[in-house]
Image: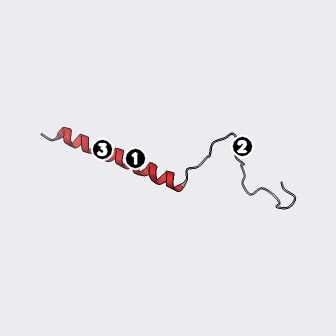
Amino acid sequence: MNDRKGFIRSREMRRAYEARRHFSILETIILFLLIMADMLAAAYSLLMAAAP
């Protein structure tokens, strides 16, 4: 609690030695694109292996 600002707005404060708890929006987009590319590559390899 701060005398000027009142209570801390966040329920849990991150400690100085702890890592961040959430991804940024850019990291989320990159992770989604990598997962989609991995799925596409797996589907392509399965289709090419099944083709005569």
At horizontal 50% and vertical 51% (from top left) the residue drawn is: 27
How far apart, in angstroms, are the residues tagged by discs 3 and 1? 10 Å
Q: Amino acid at mark 1?
A: Ile
Q: Count the marks: how many? A: 3
Q: Which mark is residue 15?
A: 2
Q: Which mark is residue 19?
A: none
User: Percent position (x, y) of residue 41?
Assistant: 30, 44
Instruction: Give the crowd class for mark 3: few <14, some 14-19, many >=20 residues within 10 Å.
Output: few
User: Percent position (x, y) of residue 2?
Assistant: 84, 56
Q: Amino acid at mark 2?
A: Arg
Q: Amino acid at mark 3?
A: Ala
Residue named by callout 3? 41
At horizontal 85% and vertical 61% (from top left) the residue drawn is: 4
Q: Quadrant of residue 44?
A: top left
How far apart, in angstroms, are the residues tagged by discs 3 and 2? 40 Å
Q: Secondary structure at mark 1?
A: helix
Instruction: Give the crowd class for mark 1: few <14, some 14-19, many >=20 residues within 10 Å.
Output: few
Left or right of 29, for residue 39 = left
Q: Secondary structure at mark 3?
A: helix
Q: Quadrant of residue 50?
A: top left
Residue named by callout 1? 35
Quadrant, the C terminus:
top left
Asked if 28 appears above or below 50 in the picture, the reply is below
Instruction: Give the crowd class for mark 2: few <14, some 14-19, many >=20 residues within 10 Å.
Output: few
How far apart, in angstroms, are the residues tagged by discs 1 and 2? 31 Å
